[in-house]
Image (cartoon, helix red, strand yellow):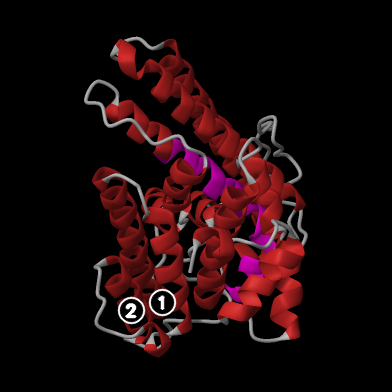
């Protein structure tokens, strides 16, 4: 199928919904309403304000796929049975390994969708880009299996452990890889700035993921799953309100790190002259993506409304002074037995 035909639908809630229904990612009216409320077309349009309709549509489809996989794990309990997560991820791994032996019609729906998205996205991209996307997505699958195993065993993570795992399960880096293609801003493979670009990407994943934790706090509590807020409350022995303040302060500090690295890269120091424009283009892409993600998290209907996101907006989180609250105010919510959780 030609790209123009495959991406012939316009970007927008209706177009994304029709595609998700046709591919089997949503199966009933309830799932369709939930997907429509997510406003993933808004995320794609915000991340690519100067790109054409087809690139926005392709990005929106990736976002739909990522969120649907996420819901299987976090909202439908995939992996509660040993071996279940591995059975789900195996066909996805096979797609990225180039396994062409299984006819498309015989693959599970998610593997079929990933194969189509991968083929349309990777066409014309460099071997370095293909390798980076594959490594990022395989790392996400590995981390997903680790997470569900921890959840089954009732293991609680320290904040440091949680942050490390969460960075891998956010699926932010694979989507950023996709944006290199759809936003025409490939990451520069340059020894002089490789470490700083890597830290820029990690800071972006952390900020987006931690703000997501604030947005999804009510849903996570209902599912009995940990996120950054409950991990902080458990480790620091404080109430949830104070833990939210601590999380907000962490977001502000990490976002400051992101902007500091971005500003340094934009100056072009230590960057070969012939690569400076490409580095600036990639930095611009990451900053636009971060702004679009934060605005989307404030507007999406994906999560149950709660108090956690009130102090974070697209212009930057505003940390409040940490205050004390009685330990009994935390109630059992901060200290009930919850499990390692993968927020997105």
Q: Are marks 1 and 2 in contact (CB under 8 Å)?
A: yes
Residue 126 x %, y %? 29, 44
Label the magenta part by its dominant secondary structure: helix
Quadrant, the C terminus = bottom right
244 vs 34: above or below? above
| Residue at which label 1 appears | 111
Q: Residue at x 39, y 82 (%)?
A: 104
Q: Quadrant of residue 169?
A: bottom left
Query: In the rendering, at what x and y percent does residue 12 appear?
Result: 73, 58
**Residue bearing the label numbered 2:** 91
**Residue at the extreme left:** 191
State the SS at label 2.
Answer: helix
Image height of 69 relative to 12, above or below: below
* Residue 18 image label: none
Quarter-wise, where is residue 246 in the image? top right
Q: Give the magenta-colored segment's residue range.
A: 202-225
Q: Does the image show residue 25? A: no
Give the alpha-carbon distance from disc 1 to disc 2, as whole Å.
6 Å
Question: Quick one: 316 or 87, which is closer to the camera?
Answer: 87
Q: Is label 1 in a helix, a strand or a loop?
A: helix
- Closest to the observer, 254 or 52: 52
Q: Residue 73: in sight, yes or no? A: yes
State how many labels appear: 2
């Amino acid at each position: 199928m030609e790209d123009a035909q495959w991406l012939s639908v316009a970007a927008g809630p209706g177009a994304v919904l029709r595609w998700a229904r046709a591919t089997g990612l949503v199966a009933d009216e309830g799932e369709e309403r939930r997907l429509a409320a997510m406003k993933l077309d808004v995320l794609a349009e915000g991340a690519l304000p100067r790109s054409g309709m087809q690139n926005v549509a392709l990005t929106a489809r990736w976002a739909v796929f990522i969120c649907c996989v996420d819901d299987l794990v976090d909202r439908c309990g995939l992996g509660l049975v040993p071996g279940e997560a591995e059975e789900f991820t195996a066909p996805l791994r096979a797609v990225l390994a180039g396994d062409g032996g299984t006819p498309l019609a015989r693959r599970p729906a998610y593997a079929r969708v990933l194969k189509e998205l991968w083929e349309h996205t990777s066409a014309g991209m460099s071997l370095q880009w293909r390798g980076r996307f594959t490594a990022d997505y395989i790392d996400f699958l590995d981390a997903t299996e680790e997470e569900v195993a921890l959840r089954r065993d009732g293991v609680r993570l320290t904040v440091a452990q949680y942050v490390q795992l969460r960075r891998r399960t956010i699926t932010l880096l694979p989507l950023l890889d996709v944006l290199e293609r759809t936003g025409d801003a490939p990451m520069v493979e340059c020894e002089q700035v490789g470490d700083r670009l890597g830290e820029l990407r990690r800071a972006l994943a952390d900020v987006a993921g931690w703000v997501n934790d604030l947005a999804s706090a009510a849903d996570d509590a209902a599912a009995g799953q940990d996120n950054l807020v409950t991990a902080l409350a458990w480790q620091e022995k404080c109430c949830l309100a104070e833990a939210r303040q601590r999380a907000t302060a962490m977001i502000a500090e990490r976002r400051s790190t992101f902007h500091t690295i971005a500003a340094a890269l934009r100056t072009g120091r230590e960057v070969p002259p012939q690569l400076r424009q490409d580095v600036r283009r990639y930095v611009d892409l990451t900053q636009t993506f971060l702004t679009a993600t934060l605005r989307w998290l404030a507007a999406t209907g994906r999560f149950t409304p709660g108090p956690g996101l009130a102090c974070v907006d697209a212009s930057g989180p505003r940390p409040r002074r940490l205050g004390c609250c009685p330990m009994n105010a935390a109630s059992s919510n901060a200290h009930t037995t919850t499990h390692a959780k993968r927020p997105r």
